[in-house]
Image (tube, coloured by chain):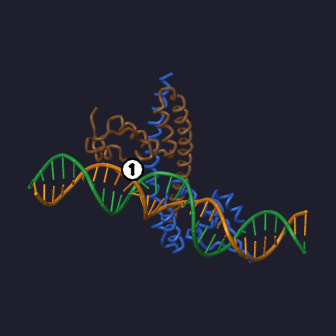
Chain colours: A blue, B brown, C green, D orange
Amino acid sequence: MTGYAPSEAARRSGFSLDTLRYYERIGLLSGVGRTSAGRRVFTDEDLGWLTLFRCLRDTGMPIAEMCRYAELARAGDHTTGQRRALLVRHAERVEEQMRLLQRQYDHLREKIDFYDTLG
Amino acid sequence: MTGYAPSEAARRSGFSLDTLRYYERIGLLSGVGRTSAGRRVFTDEDLGWLTLFRCLRDTGMPIAEMCRYAELARAGDHTTGQRRALLVRHAERVEEQMRLLQRQYDHLREKIDFYDTLG
DNA sequence: TTTCTACCTGGAGCGCGCTCCAGGTCAAGC
DNA sequence: GCTTGACCTGGAGCGCGCTCCAGGTAGAAA
């Protein structure tokens, strides 16, 4: 299990150092290791979580809900059903979001086309 | 030119009354009419603007940029080129946003599929 | 040995986009 | 005449998600 320095974890995950610290502070990310000098050491598993968080954030999930997901995961294997349900509900919202985005994008293109007709 | 009461404009545009007032306050929406008693009267043209604002907001344009667009429009016909360019740049960002959303949605579905394999 | 860099903590601050509130006005309905 | 309800204004407040800062430490480089 390789260990990553904070700067490396930030680079790989796309989150800032401050955001990584913030996520730990609010309990989203937990159990992050420390060197004897107190510095964070991120594992591949931590990076896996960060990849998931990036996915969920990019798709608009509020942090509070990501916390609920993380808590369920920490609670053990008996929560897989709830975790799956949470992700499915989220996926449905994302689908709606994609439809809306597409619709409004089409309007935007129409508007641009209109400007094109002006010369 | 029909006139609409604030509540009707809110209903049709999907913005709250407070948001309509806010947009006027910051100069995004300007020249909204008033009755003799000082109440707002929205025209079809105002609603057209609100429809555009909804499109731009739904696609993630910051309010400051919508203000710039509105100012250009108020400045007259000689700004159509700038307005078009602004929308084109925005459309490009939206395309990128759609690609990201699709990619992360795919990851999300993979994650859900993984839960499905667990039983 | 001194300096430099990367990191630490707790806590304050910020930018955005609203949202809410107090106190008031007007017009309509009872 | 009185109440009700939709609206008005100026200004304060809020929720979110970070982001920044002060003051400090450990280890590496010069």
* Quadrant into which the N terminus of chain A falls: bottom right
Percent from the top left, x then y, of residue A85?
Answer: 44, 63
* Foreground residue among B41 and B89: B41
* Foreground residue among B115 and A11: A11
Three-letter residue code for mark 1: Thr
Who's the residue at 32% across and 36% down the image? B43
Number of numbered discs: 1
Pointer 1: what residue?
B19
Horizontal relation, residue B51 to residue A71: left or right: left
Residue B3 visible? The answer is yes
* Foreground residue among A104 and B84: B84
In the image, residue C1 sits, relative to residue B27, either above or below, namely below
The kind of secondary structure element at disc 1 is helix
Percent from the top left, x then y, of residue A52?
Answer: 57, 60
Which chain does tag 1 point to? B
In the image, residue B96 sits, relative to residue A37, either above or below, namely above
Percent from the top left, x then y, of residue B117?
Answer: 52, 62
In the image, residue A3 sits, relative to residue C15, either above or below, namely below
Who's the residue at 56% across and 49% down the image? B103
Mark 1: few/some/many CA within 10 Å (<14, 14-19, 20+): few
Horizontal relation, residue D25 to residue C24: left or right: right
Residue B60 visible? The answer is no
